[in-house]
Image: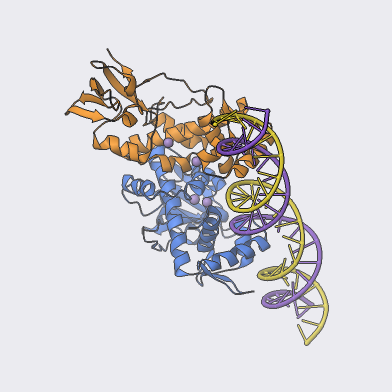
Chain colours: A blue, B orange, C purple, D yellow
Amino acid sequence: MASSTEENYLKALYNLSNGQGEVNISDLANGLKVSMPTANSMVKSLQKSDWVIYEKYKPVILTPKGQKEAALIVRKHRLTEMFLVKKMGFGWEEVHEVAEQIEHIHAPKFFERMDEMLGHPTIDPHGSPIPDNQGRMQEFSYTPLSSCKPNQTVQLTALTNSSTEFLEFLNSRKLSLGVHLKVISREAYDQSIVVSYPDHPMETLSEKVSERLLVRVLE
Amino acid sequence: MASSTEENYLKALYNLSNGQGEVNISDLANGLKVSMPTANSMVKSLQKSDWVIYEKYKPVILTPKGQKEAALIVRKHRLTEMFLVKKMGFGWEEVHEVAEQIEHIHAPKFFERMDEMLGHPTIDPHGSPIPDNQGRMQEFSYTPLSSCKPNQTVQLTALTNSSTEFLEFLNSRKLSLGVHLKVISREAYDQSIVVSYPDHPMETLSEKVSERLLVRVLE
DNA sequence: CAAATTTGTTAGAATGATCTAACTTATTAC
DNA sequence: GTAATAAGTTAGATCATTCTAACAAATTTG
Ligand SMILES: [Mn+2]
Ligand SMILES: [Mn+2]
Ligand SMILES: [Mn+2]
Ligand SMILES: [Mn+2]
């Protein structure tokens, strides 16, 4: 069984795996805020349990076994976040740190009950998909608000960044998932975008913000 | 801040501290299922953080600081057990192992919300008192059923043992906290006791069982 | 009380997770 | 296509937690 530390490495590898499914040691070290030798030695030990494929000087690749293990931890993380928001009155900006700990609890029934009480949710409070209990995660293809055009109406559906600071910024503008936004205009100079939504007839969002907002185009 | 391992030692010391508040190394080692040298070396390191007072060949004593730290972990453990039973549909025999893990989560709001949602409970699902958020625990003085006399009517209020096996035994006899029991008779030979309660007009309980059942005498 | 038993300690080792310093391989820039 | 830079590895150390083997102190027993 994976230790909490190993679980955090598997999750980081899972989240950092892009199209190729490959992760550089330096990205892994960076993501987990450990030194490269630490990441290097842990990768070697993950290989002994067949969670990754690894050759000197090559990027790390999760095996199917490693992917499933990681997806099930992500599942526990996201179910926990949803539970904290929907059942325990947490704000979406308060849940990540707690979920980072609770994801390591070994108690299948605990997470099964969360799942049932939540009605088998498919997304977490930040719009990220929740893998199913077999570790399969559906991929959504949302559009960043930054690439939307004036006059489009869109619905805010997910975020590419869920840092506390960003979530608190969104709170301050009353932006939450599900909100319908109308794109009013874009400023060519700095790529800022002006949107309108209930109670906010004219809100200017910087490119930094709008590229982190994922939307579904309604019309 | 105490590691999970240190927290488990503090909790064990707290639970093993009897009237004198002293704990032998061998009892500690036994309780935690570690070797005596392991317990010995951990006690030395707990001393460095002022959680215990310790001198060679003397029993260990928790300092007030150590007592408070331990009581707050016990609080998290028992609040968790209550939450699992009252809010998540767990049986009282299923909660201890999960609580043993969740008690180490560092997230004050998580436990504050449990406490609020439960209406600030004072006992856990097994009748043990929940320390308050300052680490103060009230002592109840209940009577073991084994020392009750025929014709007494009592209410089952707590247990001195909460092992899964014992709890499953109680489930099989439909014995739960709050049940009113009438003592019918006692067998002098083996100290077994016959009680009657709703739907169970005649139930014989061994001494081993009756000394683990704590009751409040009603009349 | 002396012997036997129980309890507690020390020494030495192992494992997991981490670091810094020094070195090597791979990639990028001119 | 070298030279400079970035990325990756090795070596060696530390800290936490645990163990077994060997020894020492305290307690119990005849
Ligand atoms: Mn999260
Ligand atoms: Mn984590
Ligand atoms: Mn318990
Ligand atoms: Mn525990």
x, y (%) of residue C13? 67, 58
Tell me: residue B42, above or below residue A130.
Answer: above
The residue positioned 33% from the left and 20% from the top of the image is B147
Tell me: residue B91, above or below residue B132.
Answer: below
- Report whether B50 appears left or right of B145: right
Q: Nearer the viewer, residue A146 or A102?
A: A102
The residue positioned 28% from the left and 34% from the top of the image is B170
x, y (%) of residue B69? 57, 31
Q: How many marks?
A: 0
Classify the position of the N terminus of chain B by image quarter: top right
**Quarter of image, res D2:** bottom right
Tell me: residue B81, above or below residue A211.
Answer: above
x, y (%) of residue B29? 55, 40
The residue at the far top in this view is B219
Q: Nearer the viewer, residue A174 or A134?
A: A134
x, y (%) of residue A165? 57, 45
**Quarter of image, res B95:** top left
- Report whether D9 appears left or right of B196: right
The residue positioned 49% from the left and 35% from the top of the image is B109
Classify the position of the C terminus of chain B by image quarter: top left
**Residue A98 makes an appearance in the image:** yes
Q: Nearer the viewer, residue D29 or A25?
A: D29
**Quarter of image, res B160:** top left
**Residue B104 makes an appearance in the image:** no
